[in-house]
Amino acid sequence: MKKFISLWLVNAVSLWIVDYFSSAISFNDTMAVIVTALALTVLNSTIKPLLKVLSAPLSFLTFGLFSLVVNGFVLWVAFGLSDGSQIASFGSAIWISILLAIVNSLINKVMGD
């Protein structure tokens, strides 16, 4: 449970940082960031592993690049599940998922995880 809450907080901070630097996503208020981060954390823990397994042959054929589409899809769904959050397009979701991965890595490095 502690790991889940840690992931949730890291996702919330990452979304807030990426929102500050990108016009492709927006949030109405802080609660929208928190709810979107919760949806993203739950989807990353449940749906994303299943999608990765199902798309493994396609990821293999594209040398792993299709995993970017899977990440973008999960982010796009997370934004769709939360009120008060908007994402410009599916293409934006792919780019934002790359930025989130970078920011998440930096935050985890600072936290020592």
Image (cartoon, rainbow, N blue to C red):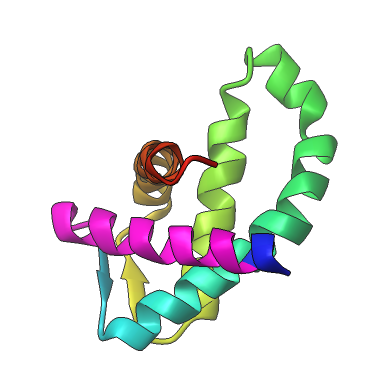
Foreground residue, 36 or 23? 36
Residue ID at (41%, 66%): 12
Queried whether the magenta region covers residue 66, the answer comes back as no
Q: Main secondary structure of the magenta part?
A: helix
Give percent across and percent down for residue 78: 54, 67
User: Is residue 41 positioned above or below 84 on the image?
Assistant: above
Give percent across and percent down for residue 95: 36, 41
Tell me the quadrant of the picture where the C terminus can be found.
top right
Residue ID at (38%, 36%): 102
Residue ID at (36%, 56%): 14
Query: Is 58 positioned to the left or the right of 67 in the image?
Result: right
Tell me the quadrant of the picture where the N terminus can be found.
bottom right
Query: Is 104 positioned to the left or the right of 1 in the image?
Result: left
Foreground residue, 38 or 7? 7
Residue ID at (46%, 70%): 79
Foreground residue, 62 or 34? 34
User: Is residue 17 positioned above or below 83 on the image?
Assistant: above
Give percent across and percent down for residue 61: 71, 14
Give percent across and percent down for residue 52: 75, 38
Foreground residue, 54 or 10? 10
Indicate the quadrant where residue 5 lies.
bottom right
- Count numbered badges in the picture: 0
Q: Which residues are magenta?
A: 5-24
Queried whether the magenta region covers residue 15, the answer comes back as yes
